[in-house]
Image (spheres, rainbow, N blue to C red):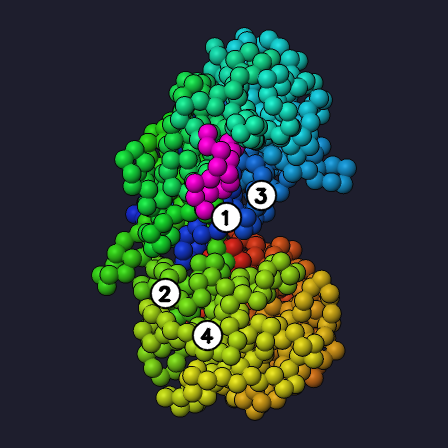
Amino acid sequence: MKILWLQYICLALCFNVVGLANGAENPWGGQYEPVGLTAGGSIYMANVSLHDSQLLTVSSDMSCSFLTTNTGVAWRMLHRDEIGSQCTSPAEFHPRDPNTIYWLHQSELRVTHDRGITWHSTGDSQPWNESGKRAAVKRIYVDPDHPETIFVGTDSSLFVSEDASKTWRLCGGTVGSVIRIAADRTKPIGATRRYFVGTDQGVFRSDNNGRTFAPKTTGLPGGELTGFAGPSDGKTTILYAATPCTLKDGVLAGGLYRSRDNGDTWQCIMNAGLNRETKRTSEFANGDLPQYLHLAASDKLPTRVYVSGRGTSYFPPNHCTIYRSDDAGETWRATFFSDPRFNKPGMMCNVALDYQTVVSGNRDQDVTRNLEVSASNPDVVAMSHGRWYFLTTDGGATWKSPHEGGGKTDADGHRVWRNNGWVVTSTWNYYIDPFDSQRRYLCYTDMGFARSFDGGHMWEWDQKIIPWKNTTYALAFDPEVKGRLWGAFSNVHDIPNGNAIYGKVNINRTGGVGVSDDYGNTWRKLSLPVERATLSVVVDPHSPKEKRTLYASVFGSGVYRSDDGGGTWQLKNTGLDESGMYRCLKLVLHKDGTLFNLTTGKRPKGSTAGVGLYRSTDKGETWQKISTGQPWTWVKDFSVDTEDSRIILVAASREKGGLYRTLDGGKNWNLLVSKASEHFGGYFHPAHKGWIYLTCCEGGGKESGLYLSRDDGQTWEPFRDLPFGNIQRVAFDPADPDHIILTTFGSSAIRAPAVP
């Protein structure tokens, strides 16, 4: 029996490996599968391994970081407890060991020795994290000839370890936030080492192994530094610096500088090929003067240098681009043309198109966020650029888009895209069409709306078809008419998360309800009396098919009802929200006819007034608050038991945060569990009585962003292996009882096992 069991395990593993080798649909390769559109959110700190140009790393502003070993065919999200989101420093690749990478978890220095599979802290002694304050780490640097020497530069200081991060000391003499660190490799190994550091306040040099530094700015304009590089190949060391461009007596001043004598003197290299205009030529330009920001060069060839330029025009020439020099700055040429509308000779688009660019017909070519060149190959350059990651392996002649995922046109003519594991978008709801289970729908922040026609494997995106472009919050399906669905739309994103609740988002932007009669292929607006962010729409299945009764919750206005399929609407706020803010989040119409509405508060006031759950038994004509006396100031979601409308779950954040339940329609409430400062919701499993899921968002829970109780809330199991922390809602596929679908704040949707 033991032998048979081992054979079974081996066969299972073999099938798994074969599946992956043949292009299995799960790029993460484990229990959790990313679903929906790739990319879409802001990304930072791209880098490429000097040992392998297929090994790439990148971070995002959505609480996650990624690694690929095959140039983006499949990206793996790093577990939130190992390498979370950080947008300050790129990963640093060990100069000799291709399996060792240094990176950050928040501001803690961590290391992997297995190409990113597992990560651990480099040690307890990390002085930039001590004294009760964590500094923002801006740069990690490993000496290519002495890899036991590691520098960590922060927003105010520079530290060095000479024993592979066991102990650290503060480097004296530097001032400002560190941009980049470099070593002079021209002296014999074993000799006293010379190091350079560029900060936002200047260039500094150490002649004593990094113990103390002194400014080296003769010839540089005083003030700010925006970029620095110091390539050294063992024979030649060249320093490059970028300073802000200014206008002096009508002449452009500042810009790019070079030093060939280790920083003792500097010469301006604002030479032919660079943008030297002194006024903008486009309303979409980034300013009246060009600016030069990120500098990068390879130790392999110090005379090759790249710099990102902020343009005075949108279209070439003088656009935002990457300039390259092969003669240490004597001459320059632009290498980066990403918008498909760039079509002039010598300025043609040379960047692979992704789904956003294909659909929109343009790409927003803007300022680069970071720029890195392989230390071993000056032709290999990686950069983060808004929502995009770009990589060139031919010195800028062409650029790849490793973030895109592969696209194709299906048999019905839909342009659809696969998920390659890089997911940095927010989703609110996941739906399966009631008449065709192969049709799936995702409601997105910023990306609007996406559809799948093959059960959720490939996805179509066309933001132009929806009536309000930014966010789709919810859908409702006609119970009898195939293809008819209503949508709740908004040009305000992130409600009810912190951006909106803390008042950082203008909630008065437009929104409303739209209807489609062709499965979401085309939409038309419905005429609500106000055009504001609409977060929920429900349909009464018992109303006449020709004149459906609809309800919509409008954030800041209240609840509206239509008795003619959306032709006309009436405000139904009697008894609703004594605060008068009407920050309505979600409607649920139970099968027994009871209508529920959840209303949240406005922080940082922290008031309970108006916040809570309301019930109507007369089609919204009157409302009764059924959570009176509860301490909630900020709620996000609720669920009602499908069989008994008296059983309800409400998730509360911050003050008295946790998952609350009533079993008697709101007469009594009890706190079931508290796992985080910000809970999103609780969800009943439709096929397992007594199963409740808890989601935590904006920081995640103590052990996970997702928990399950299989004993009606008495005990809770965390999904510890779930790599992402900010989970919003849980959806269920009746045809797949072994899995659930998670919508997230920053990782699109995730297909997860139903139990931890």
Residue 459 visible within the image: yes
- Assign a secondary structure to mark 3: loop
Front tag of 3 and 1: 1
Q: Give the amino acid at mark 2.
A: Ile
Nearer-N-terminus badge (4/1): 1
Where does label 1 land, which residue? 42
Residue 394, position as x, y percentages in the image: 34, 29
Tell how many labels.
Answer: 4
**Relative to the observer, which residue lies in front, 525 or 235?**
525
Give the class, few, some or many, for how many residues have Cα within 10 Å of label 1's Cα (few <14, many ≥20): some
**What is the spatial separation of the Cα atoms under label 2 and label 4, in whole angstroms?**
14 Å
> In front of the other: label 3 or label 4?
4
Residue under circle 2? 465
What is the magenta range? Answer: 276-294
- Is residue 691 depicted above or below 120 in this figure? below
- Residue 280 forms part of the magenta stretch: yes
Along the line of sight, which residue is nearer the eye, 441 or 318?
318
In the image, residue 299 sits, relative to residue 540, either above or below, namely: above
Picture residue at 53% right of the left edge, 69% below the top: 533
- Indicate the amino acid at tag 3: Gln
Query: Between marks 2 and 3, how big is the CA–CA gap?
Result: 34 Å
Q: Secondary structure at mark 1?
A: loop
Residue 675 lies left or right of residue 82; in this view the side is right
Q: Amino acid at mark 4?
A: Val
Cα–Cα span, label 3 and label 1: 12 Å
